[in-house]
Image (cartoon, grey):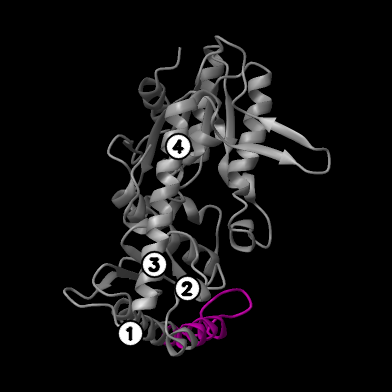
Amino acid sequence: MEQLDEYATTTVRMFPDYADTVLWFPEPVPYDVAKLSPALVRDLQDWERSFYDALTHRARWRAKAAARRLDKRGHKLAERVASELGQEFSVEYRSMVDSEDVRNVGVSNAPAANPDAAAAFAALVAASREEHERIEKLMAEDGENFGWFAYAPNSQTVFRSSEHPHGRPPTQVLFLGGRSGVGKSTVALALQDLLRERDIHHALIDGDNLDLAHPAPWVEHPDARLAENNLAAMWGNYRALGYSRLIYTNTVSVLQMSRLSMALGGEVDAVGILLEASDRQARRRLGQRERGGSLREHVERSKAAAKRLEQESPEDVHRVNTSGRTPEQIAAQLLELIGWE
């Protein structure tokens, strides 16, 4: 199981939209939990309202100048949050204009200007560590029967993805990640063709479809973990029919292998592969399916995702360059890496 990273222990991310707060550590932190000063909370809320006011009904910037003004305010607010939290924490702020501009604001050798806020975030760190240790202990004691279960309250049905007869093979899963436009779906289908030719039984699940809804479930119900619960239910049904190999695609799947493996349940043999592509290549692919403002937004998100994946992907994740290669060539390399026969 991966260790807790900086986004659960020292680095608070700050950005508008997606939740009723601009603070994430690593999940959204409500203002009443954060214990920031009332004046700072009001300014953060006003900043987020200004963000929405600066967008059209199609979520486009009314003017780039508005985005630059919001960025300037955002940097100042990040400094104020960092000042209230003190030297034990830093605040990461990513520019709305340039996704490559990521600033980490902190105060070295300075006590917290707001001890209550510092104590609140320290409590969140302690809770994350306690939960992490609890899960590690449970997995060590009873890993075979530990995992995510889905429960349907109306029928009172429990989907137990980890229950399986003695001697049943472990789940072998390929977590295939990568920025938008890198070709994850195309490569996954090419890999599926290779496996089918070899009569290697497997299933393919696109993680994006597990919580695809409006409003976004991870925003409206962040504690529901809908994607993990749906994965547990779906994989439990596949396992009941004898499947033991899974290709799972999702942009950040290689960053979530531990929790996704728990959702699959039982013994899991996981391989993480990160597909990589240049900005130019990703833009060209995105241009085949997006237009105008939508294309610009997807390109910027793809750049941000690429940087995050490069920085945060575990060392044991295989990195595969897709530039100048066909999906079939890439799929052949993936088959060698996962070693399915």
**Residue type at the position of mark 1:** Lys
Q: Is residue 101 visible?
A: no
> In the rendered structure, which disc, 2 or 4, sits on the residue that comes first in sequence?
2
**Residue type at the position of mark 4:** Leu
Numbered label tally: 4
- The residue at 49%/67% (across/down) is 29
Question: Pointer 4: what residue?
Answer: 176
- What SS does tag 3 mark? helix
The quarter of the displayed image where residue 218 is located? bottom right
Residue 22 in the image: state x and y as whole percent: 47, 73
Question: Pointer 2: what residue?
Answer: 22
Residue 315, above or below 60? above
Residue 117 in the image: state x and y as whole percent: 39, 75
Q: Which residues are magenta?
A: 43-66
> In the rendered structure, which disc, 4 or 1, sits on the residue that comes first in sequence?
1
Question: Pointer 3: what residue?
Answer: 121
**Residue type at the position of mark 2:** Val
Mark closer to the observer (4, 3): 3
**Residue type at the position of mark 3:** Phe
Q: Quadrant of the N terminus?
A: top left
